[in-house]
Image: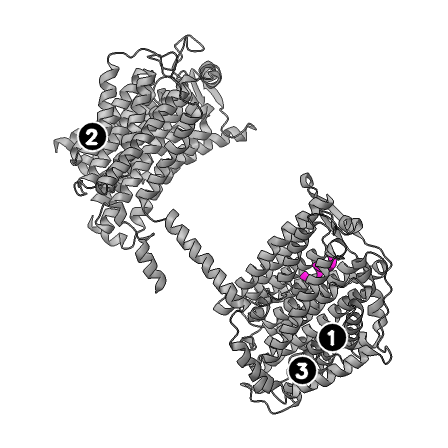
Amino acid sequence: MILSTVARFVVALMLLFSVFLLLRGHDAPGGGFLGGLVAAIGFILYVLAEGTRAARAALRVDPLGVAYVGLGVALLAGFMGLASGAPFLTALWTKLGDVKLGTPVLFDVGVYLVVVGGVLALVFALEEEVG
Amino acid sequence: MAAEHAAAAPSPAARAMTSIGIAIALGFAGWLASLVPAVAGGAAPGAAWPWLPAIGAALAFRIDGLSLLFALLISVIGAIVLLYAHRYLRGHPHAARLQLFLTLFMLSMLGLVLADDALLLFVFWELTTVTSYLLIGFDSESAKARRAALQAMLVTGSGGLALLVGLLVVASVTGTLRISEWLAAGSIAGHAAYTAAFALVALGAFTKSAQFPFHFWLPAAMAAPTPVSAYLHSATMVKAGVYLLMRMHPVLGGGEPWFWTLTVVGSATALWASVLALRQTDLKLALAYTTVTALGFLVLFLGGEVDLAITASVTFLIVHAFYKSALFLVVGIVDHATGTREAQRLGGLARAMPTTAAAAALAALSMAGFPPLLGFIGKELKYEAALAIVSRPLALATLLVIANALTFAVAAVVAFRPFWRGEPETPRAPHEAPRRMLVGPLLLAAAGFAFGVYPELVGHYLVEPAVAAIRVTPVAVDLKLWHGINVPLAMSVATALLGLAFYAGHEWLRTLLGRGLAVLPITGDRVFDAALDALKRVAAFQTRILQGGSLRRYLFTTWLVVPLAIGSVLLLRGGLAWPATVSPIPAYAWPIVLLVAAGSFAPIVTTSRLASIAALGIVGAGVSLLYLIFGAPDLAMTQLLVETLTVVIVAVVLLRLPRFSGRDHPGQAGRVRDAVLAIAAGATVSALLLAVLASPLDPTLADWFAANALPAGFGRNVVNVVIVDFRALDTLGEITVVAVAASAAWALLKLRPGASARGDGA
Amino acid sequence: MEILLALLVGFMFGASVYLMLSRNWIRYLFGFIVIGNAVNLLLFAVGRVELGHPALVPEGLLAPEGPVANALPQALILTAIVIGFGLLAFALVLASRAWAEFETVDVDEMRVAEPREDAAREAEDE
């Protein structure tokens, strides 16, 4: 079970890397799309090693649900702009110490979740279909 | 149909709908009645709201004598029919629906006669077509009802389109859409466009009012519930065409084409339908054909230019509305009580149904034209008018006498014989109708009697203002029961004698007519069927061409557009261009480009699945490198990741599918054809891209994004700032697509039949 | 370089059109993937290409110095790549289902919704 041990380690590493990509995306190459794809590929590695059933169990939540939550997060970022009286999806920024926080970052988190969830749902579906 | 539900109680919805409908009808009737004295005095109140100011259309309404007469008939008979229908369809599961449709129809009809804007009139005209479609097809489980509804809609609807064009022609001649301004401007008979306008408007009127040769839809429409027939097919909708002709009389009337068309069509309709009416054994069908006869009379007299003819038409309109809707309601009662409408099986009903018999008798006497009923006055006026409108009136007078005599005989067959002769052989024992169903026919029949005895009221308050509106000048109308001994009276006597003879021999005539008509080669009904069949065949033919069901043919057609539409424009209109300044090609770009090209081409020539998948990976990786070369690291990384995923999932699926076969394109010719198209499409895209690159790029957007990413978007990665901030709405749509694609894939897998059983095995 | 790109894009288009006209579902899918790449490259080229210089703002500056790559088409293509993948995955699920149902990859044989003309005519006659 070397592959599965390695897979677990690599998945963890890739998830970490994907979050790094997501967070630095605003200032350097990266972002929600890239991060989401990296995370999805990490999980797919796990699928190839352990099968979809184990991957689903490891993920704990339904990938489609993750995608919907992501869509909700992105919408929330949009409505925060709306709530402040500006048009839908207007960016709002605040500074927390030295860290910039803004609705575009939240929006990117939504993108990340949609990409992870959507891609995983599609791949799981294919794997299960083909069996 | 109705009797099956007679025992059940009306549903709350039906009760509510009936109440609402009757309230609306009575509200309108009361309001309109309050306007009668003013309108009789020459006023024409109206109102207008802006609608489509750019083309001069307005929500304009106007109530002159003609509109008022029609609107009163519509609302009063509407209330009566709604009350009757409520009882008639008691317990029917869709009773509320019928009441709703009836109410909507009534409102459409009111709008039609009150509209003062040509477009508005057309909209209401079509609304009556649509609502009558729903009403005729009310019994939607019956194929016959559906067919009749479709037929009525297609015939009157196509006439409606003609009418629209006709009205627009008139509008272009007069320069306004306001009908009252048309009336003020007078006849356009001298104008070059007159013939077109008249022909189109007449087509609309003739189809709606079931004139020969479009009469066939009306008897077929008897598939509707009887209250509907009483309302639409005697008193209101079929009169819409007559209303239109009356309304347009000042604008289009007065010429030879108008006179001859209306006279000939009206006479032909009246005579032909009265012959067919005597042939019917179904009481409702017999009434339907006499309705066509009456519509023929109405049209016929509108052809005339003398006041007397118009007066005859307007008076007969009122007469007919009263007696015909009363008789339809009576037939509904008979059907309800006995279970049949067949003339041969009905007899001696007067004993069991005395009140119905009385209403039937009053209405039938009016229909047959006996004094002192309103029908007598109507008939005398017709005869007087016939003698007045033509110089040699013998032919017209003869025709009228024969048609009236046939109507007389039908009145006897429908309303005399079933009640007063013979014994009933009906499916159910006859019994008197419930009170709510009797109110209507009694009121209508009594009105025919009361107005016959006091004709001055009708004459002064209803007929005179309507005639004045048609003539656009005050006209004195003096309705009298007794005209003295004169030619019309003699004609009346002749009519009665001839009618009695027709009645006496009606069974013999019926068989004779049946035999004679059976050999008739062409009927409107058959023409309609043939036309509809031909239309269906054309539709099937072109569907087979456009939508053959072959994916490759669709794709071929779609791709053909690229060289044909884009390529030809580039070639023929001088769109080809070559970029003036180009950047140098770095040496390391060559192998990448060549690899991508080779990878794109490989799946065409190889039959190996693995080789194809590898080629796919090469294309993706090469494109990714190109992105990297040209300063797009985000794209390059994304592309590489997606390419990895793509190769994985394609491999997963493909390895389960069979190997490629060599014969993917049918035959040598097919291969050549597809290759030619592929080359042409590819060359077009290249040429298009070159042409685009040859034109200067507007850098405004690119510069703005680069300059504002950090100051306004607080990000140093311009691409990411565009995605999550500047163009976030686009991105929101795009991630929605991803989520939808995933949901669809899930649905495709989970929602198939037997999915759970298979899922367990996987 | 622009001309070479234009020729490459046209070549990829031609190859994928030919692939998509194949009767074989699998070849069609390859055409589908290649044409996705070709369209992305087309958009990229339309935004003009320039060697090097990603659209990043260096530390200490408010805007990129000198000319950088056009960020707008990049943003469009980036999302298009991911969407393209979603559609491809869906198409593969569809292909897989079709194979399970029909046991064929010949698109001319998959005619449940739109039967052949002769079959349609027979059905009409019945």
Tell me the amino acid under the disc marked 1.
Leu
Percent coordinates x, y for residue B16 in the rendering: 63, 64
Percent coordinates x, y for residue B373 in the rendering: 78, 78
Residue placed under numbered mark 3 in the picture: B409
Percent coordinates x, y for residue B376 in the rendering: 78, 77
Give the Cα separation between the discs numbered 2 and 1. 88 Å
Residue placed under numbered mark 1 in the picture: B443
Q: Nearer the viewer, residue B423 or B719?
A: B423
Q: Could you say whether the residue bearing mark 3 is in a helix, strand or loop?
A: helix
Number of numbered discs on residues? 3
Q: Residue B760 vs residue B223: left or right?
A: left
Residue pushed farthest bottom? B422
Percent coordinates x, y for residue B352 in the rendering: 64, 88
Residue placed under numbered mark 2 in the picture: B602
Give the Cα separation between the discs numbered 1 and 3. 24 Å
Q: Which residues are magenta?
A: B241-247
The answer to whether residue B353 of the structure is visible from this angle is no
Q: Nearer the viewer, residue A10 or B477?
A: B477
Q: Residue B152 vs residue A116: left or right?
A: right
Q: Residue at position x 24%, y 44% from top? A: C96
Tell me the amino acid under the disc marked 2.
Ala
Give the Cα separation between the discs numbered 2 and 3. 89 Å
Instruction: Output the chain of dot 3.
Output: B
Q: Are marks 1 and 3 in contact (CB under 8 Å)?
A: no
